Image (spheres, rainbow, N blue to C red):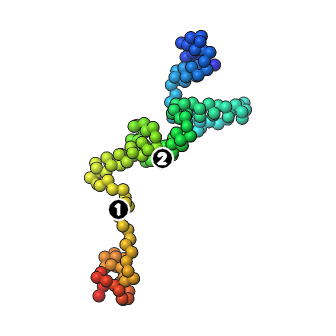
Amino acid sequence: MTFKAHKALSVLTVEQMQDYDVCKKTVLDYYRLDADEYLKRFSTAKREPGETHKMYRARINDYLSYYLDARQITSFDALRDDVLLQQFVCTLSPEVQNFVMTRQPKTAEEASQFADLQAQMTHKAAGTTNQTPGVGIIPFQKRGNGPPPAQTQQAYGVKGNGGGGGGANAPP
């Protein structure tokens, strides 16, 4: 055990020292590592020289357990949501990611709400609408068998096909 761990445990009573969970919590609280640090250590861990595969597995298992404890993940649904949260956040732009993470979302749902809030605030500040691009816009309307409307013909330099059924927008 390290000097720091001994120092952390020195505040416990003899009875408390007999309880593994109390000792573990005391040491973890003393080191004050947060969930993000445990996740980083878990994700970047490599087997050390002289470390057996079994020892390495035990070490990364501890990192994962500490992460789950720090995030208070006790069920499969909570784990699933946490994985979803991590994936969602890592796909955000740096600006949105910073906005979301400073609000410390507990769930993927909260993170998505914060991201939407940031988008709305950005759109209002820029003087644009908060409409999601492409939503509510009909890019193509199916028409009859006649030629395309005159505006489309002009935009693409297309002339009417001369076929019947052109309708009101067909060229003469």
Tags 1 and 2 touching, CB below 8 Å: no
Rendered image: mark on residue 88: 2
Q: Residue 92: x percent and y percent?
A: 44, 47
* Count of residue discs: 2
Image position of 72 (left or right of 54): left
Can you give x and y, in whole percent of width and height, for residue 122 in the image? 32, 48
> In percent of the image, x 34 and y 76: which residue is there?
152
Q: Which residue does the image show at 33% across and 49% down from the upper left?
A: 120
Residue 21 quadrant = top right
Relative vertical location of residue 172 with respect to residue 121 in this rendering, above or below: below
Q: Which label sits in the foreground, 1 or 2?
A: 1
Q: Say whether residue 19 is left or right of residue 164.
A: right
Question: Residue at the top extreme?
Answer: 14
Q: Which residue is mark 1?
A: 136
Quadrant location, the N terminus = top right
Which amino acid does the dot numbered 1 rest on?
Answer: Gly
> Callout 1: few (<14), some (14-19), or many (20+) C-alpha neighbours within 10 Å?
few
